[in-house]
Amino acid sequence: MNVARPSCFDVAVIGAGPAGCSAALALARTGHAVVLLEKAALPRYKTCGGGVLARAFKLLPASAQSVVERSFHSVALNFSGDEMGFVTIRPQPVVYMTMRADLDCLLAREAQKAGVQLVESCTIKHINLRPDCVAINSEREQYRAKFVIAADGVHSATAKAVGWPDLPALAPALEHEIYLADEDFARFSQVPRFDFNTLDAGYAWVFPKCTHLSVGILSTHRTCPELQTRLADYLQRLGIMRIQKTEKHGYLIPLAPRRGPLARGRVLLVGDAAGLVDPITAEGITHAIVSGQLAAAALTQSRLDVTAVSSLYQSLLEKNILGELRAARFLARILYRHPRLRHAAFRLNGQKLCEFVTNVVMGQATYRETLKRPSSYLKFLGQ
């Protein structure tokens, strides 16, 4: 059934990833007229390890289970060269493995079913801020909306057009989709793993999918010219040699939010466009979903009052995300910038540290609450 297009939408959401789809779905469910603009045709490949943590998965629609390739109740953390390895196990899955092309497409279709007008293959050429609305010009059409939610990723053209400064901290990452012979795949198919000491200030990972491995590496340094070499060394060290097919991808991960309020007038930033990524795990899906939902809540609660939206959205972010990210950045500096202290902490209390981080990704603990109790993290450091 064709739905008549309004002359001016309540909200235009740019980008159909978890942040944009979550915002669009929440707004549609509260009766707003929403258009979701996606530059590609869905499904489209999205560079991402595809591991959806338990804390994020519980925020998704129930139908998300249909795009889960595998789920794991245990995760391994290893320190190359130190002979240290830890495994955490939970009764419920810690991580759900997906391909982001499938997950994003499902979320966009869920928003569409709720009444969102989804426009695919829509490249935005210009955004014009007007006193009463925002005009969005694509290659083919113009869309008008009272507000815009920018969910267009780390390279957000919307944020640039509206005048936000660049993201202050970016982590380069490589991710390979690797297909192996059955007997080789079986060696790595039982548990996701994270490996430190593969490079300075970063880590590598292996995520088993249904028929292949997603293997990647990242550095928290803004530039790391040897990333390709380090990933090749990592594969060799693990014995991943007889590769049948590899799909190679590179991307950037924001490790800190954009400076200043994340809403300006009629434009709100969410997800990677806002820089809302856990700096310890470099995982962004959780805060993408939450920020999308918070943007929708701010617009709904303010009744689309432009004078109230910005402060309300910033307040909701502070309460639910920004304070947690500040605590995480403090801990991330210890983890990535002080290798001797990290080594000592894990040598003394590695299992406890891993259990703590697992509790965080399960949604059962927070970095912020831990830092409010110095005795808890001093114990981790053996003090």
Image (cartoon, grey):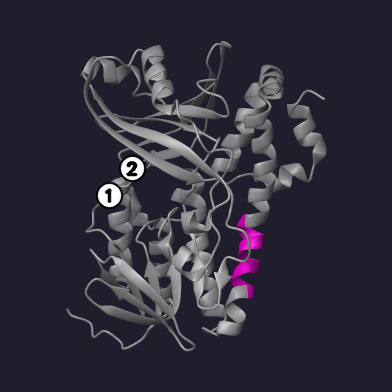
Please provide percent x and percent y for residue 149: 45, 69
Please provide percent x and percent y for residue 382: 78, 23
Please provide percent x and percent y for residue 360: 60, 42
Give the main secondary structure, helix, strand or loop, of the magenta stretch: helix
Q: Is residue 107 magenta-colored? A: no
Q: Is residue 192 visible?
A: no
Q: Secondary structure at mark 2?
A: loop
Numbered badge on residue 368:
none
Cβ atoms under marks 1 and 2 closer than 8 Å: yes
At 53% from the left and 39% from the top, the residue drawn is: 222
Q: Is residue 23 visible?
A: yes
Please provide percent x and percent y for residue 369: 72, 47
Give the side of residue 168 with respect to residue 117, left or right.
right
Q: Which residues are magenta?
A: 311-321
Amino acid at pointer 2: Thr
Q: Which residue is mark 1?
A: 102
